Amino acid sequence: MIVSMAKIKVNSLKINLPTDVPSVQRETKQDFVSVSINAQGQVQIEKELITSKDALLPKLQEIYAKNKDQKILISADKDSTHEEMMVLLGKVRAAGFQKVAFTIKAGGSKPMATP
């Protein structure tokens, strides 16, 4: 299954892509359960703040038990750490989810300097 979201920006080589490929159905944010992490490492699922790190995995497992095809949309504050993101992703995967996407904010970021 291919998942496509609007406003995807990829910096790559200029290439000509095939045009006779059928379009992929776009999925809306309503198709996903939103999981957010802020700069302090606090996690929120939909609108519920998860108050302890030990409560995160059971909550994710509860959601997965209700719908094994559920998709997760992870949003992270730009000041959250890589470690916090990897721990969160690990718990999402440990709960059983296979369909995970990340949100980004278009624009506003500066290109990385090349060595």
Image (cartoon, rainbow, N blue to C red):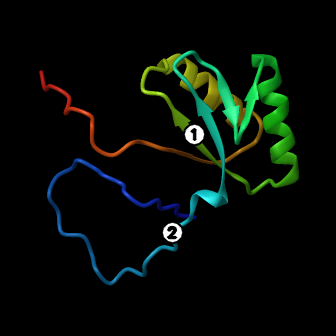
Tell me the quarter of the image containing the C terminus: top left
Where residue 34 sits in the image (x, y, percent)?
Answer: 64, 44
Work out whether mark 1 precedes mark 2 in sequence or the reverse, and give the earlier one: 2
Q: In this rendered view, identify the residue nearer to me: 115 or 30.
A: 30
Tell me the quarter of the image containing the N terminus: bottom right
Q: Residue furthest front?
A: 47
Q: Which mark is residue 55?
A: none
Where residue 93 sits in the image (x, y, percent)?
Answer: 69, 36
From what the image shows, is residue 67 above or below residue 88?
below
From what the image shows, is residue 52 above or below residue 58?
above
User: At x 42% / y 42%, what residue is drawn?
Assistant: 104
From what the image shows, is residue 78 above or below residue 2?
above
Disc 1 residue type (three-letter): Ile
Disc 2 residue type (three-letter): Arg
The answer to whether 32 appears left or right of 105 in the picture is right
User: At x 58% / y 57%, what residue is drawn?
Assistant: 29
Where residue 64 sits in the image (x, y, percent)?
Answer: 81, 46
Name the quadrant containing residue 113.
top left
The residue that label 1 is drawn on is 74
From what the image shows, is residue 93 above or below residue 55?
below
Where residue 16 sits in the image (x, y, percent)?
Answer: 18, 69
Classify mark 1: residues with Cα within 10 Å, few (<14), some (14-19) or many (20+): many
Circle 1 sits in a helix, a strand or a loop, which is it?
A: strand
The residue that label 2 is drawn on is 26
Circle 2 sits in a helix, a strand or a loop, which is it?
A: loop
